[in-house]
Amino acid sequence: MSETAKYLILASSFLVLAISFAIGLWAKKKVTSPEAFFGGAKIFGPLTIGLATMAAVGSAFAVVGVPGLVYSTGNTILLFMFAAPAFVFGYLVIGKKLRGMAEIGTVASLGDLSDLRFNHHRGIKLILSIMLFIGCAMYLSAQVEACAKLFENLFDWNRFVISAVIFAILIAYTVISGEIGGILTQAFQGFVIVLAGLIFIISFFTVTGGFGPVLEAISGAQGAAAGLNPDSMTAWGSLPGSYSFAWVLLPTLGIMCQPQVLTRILMLKDPRDMPKLSIYAVLTNMVAGMMVMAVGYCAIFLVANGTLAIEDPDQAVFKVAGHLGLVAQLFVYPAVLAAALSTSSLFLSLAGNIVSRDLPSSLGLKIRPARQVATARIAMSVMGVFAIGFAAVSGDMVAILGTYGFGTLTAATFPIFIIGLLWKGASSQGVMLGMLTALVTTLGGITIELLKKFDLSSFAWPGGVPWYVFVMAASVVVTIFASLVTSGATGDKLDRRVEMAMDL
Amino acid sequence: MKFNVETSLITLSAVLWLMMVGLAGIGHWLAALYVLLGLLLIYGVLGSSHKGHFDLRLVAFPSLVWILMWAAAFWLAEHYAVAFAGQYPDFTILGFHPSFAAIVVLFWVVPTLLMGFGFEMVKDRWLSQERWEEFVRRVHEPVDGDEDKEGPA
């Protein structure tokens, strides 16, 4: 690749950063109150929220990791990407109840929601804050790692410096404009991902001629010689069936309670626009799903035909883009960056919210609203710097932790926001115990996985099912059974306005 | 704890969670996926609740249609994965292995469009303008003005 091409790719990526920064600056004038800064502004339409939600859910793992997994293990991971109907199901089942809660009082964070539903139960808010913080740290560090790897194909630059520069700009615009800027930049970044997706889908058909030639290529002698497995083209791919189970379960039940989805519902101007929001979210999600399938399949086709060699599956998207030429590269690098930035800005805001509002409130400390904003800005900056430092010193470990983020956040939020909003009998004691179970089992699960990673344990999870599935099940089951024998925040003790929202 | 329909359903959901994870844990992951569909149905029914009444028409469309499509997708995916294991399939659909074609069509594209546009079709049943305005009005009025003006759906 010529030096000019490399710098053009760099320029296209930094254009995304520059536009995001400009949007953040512009959005500052819309931050008219501390609540608006934290996410309490119900001012956005369905298209903005739909694009922002898709972008924030689709992290760098979706754009880089998923095509690599499609290339190396086949269709299993696509079950995760294709579970788009779950988006709509989430809106259908809890959307109006959740949005109704935002009418009751100032709801700018998930902690505020928890306060309303469970009568300001400080224990629930504390554990929610801790769990969300763990999830934020996992996600953020993984995004830093993705940014650090972004340009390693092109330049012999220090990875730490690259991620530090990118994150400094991200931190700057997030700190300036909070969740208002967060939503708008994420919507723009979602648009970039969709645009790159369309380019890749067209390129896929141009290069391969369709899905049939891919199946033929992987089933041929050259495919076998390249170490590719034709069975990976069945629905379940070449991974054990337990992965198919986990990767259907996780998005199906997990999407509806991810902070990326919950917080955005709260910011929708008119709740009756939720069906439109669903359409925008799932259509853009379908383009993203099609893109990662196209990239993965393209990688299989090119390797099976002997055109390309891919040693590291995580490099599949860059190798394929390199084969497709400069136009594809001018879109894929910005798309990866957009995916990392959108997820990162959301989790930076979430971390700022936790440190400045939810955590102090759960400990009985009161911070004035104006000071909350200043505290959040400092917290976001510290969290961003911490994520850069952690990613720099921990190497592969951060990528492993990043994949746990989704499961951890689901275990943290499902008892409160799904069980809690669907069942008036969900008691504060039950949810507290369920959350405690989630926290303890999450820490246990991560510890076991890290011990296994460093060959210090040979523990195998039953049936090969990923550990976070057991964590989710334990937290939900404990929440329900403990609620059956306790009564806090239920019956007469349930706020009448909350009851009205749950009855919507 | 008074056992009403909601409580019974949520208790059943806890049992299904245990059954689902138990089945997956002993290697019956496909059976666990079918149990997941039962769980989705329960959440769908609970989500349709309005003042203690369930709107089963709202559950039937689009959620139940979606769930049935996923059941068919899982069955066909497994059927053709077993039928053509270790060999090139006798036929393809849109160029896909028939096992994966079931997923593309019945798990992804059709249910996604069905849920997205189906939700728009049942929008008024899901949340009418009148019901929302009534909710906003009542939420902001004093506690003694709690008279219910709208009956169950």
Image (cartoon, grey):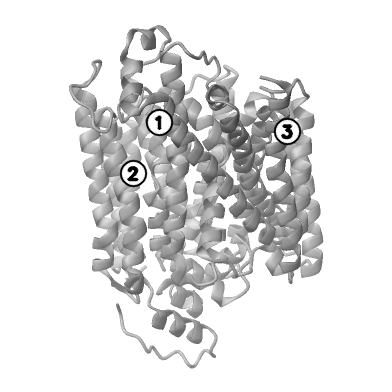
Residue A312 picture quarter: top right
| Residue depicted at 40% across the width and 81% down the height | B131
* Circle 3 Cα neighbour tier, 10 Å, few/some/many (<14 / 14–19 / ≥20): many
Q: Compared to A202, does A86 lie above or below?
A: below
What whole-number distance in Å separates the C-alpha atoms at marks 3 and 1? 40 Å
From the top left corner, tell me how far across and down residue B114 is, in percent: 30, 55
Q: Chain of mark 2?
A: B
Under circle 3, the secondary element is helix
Q: Secondary structure at mark 2?
A: helix
Task: Where is residue A308? Give x, y as percent.
Answer: 50, 14
Residue A418: give x, y in percent of width and height.
44, 58
Q: Are marks 2 and 3 in contact (CB under 8 Å)?
A: no
Is disc 3 on the same chain as disc 2?
no
Q: Amino acid at mark 3?
A: Phe
Instruction: Report whether residue A391 is seen.
Output: yes
Q: Which residue is mark 2?
A: B108
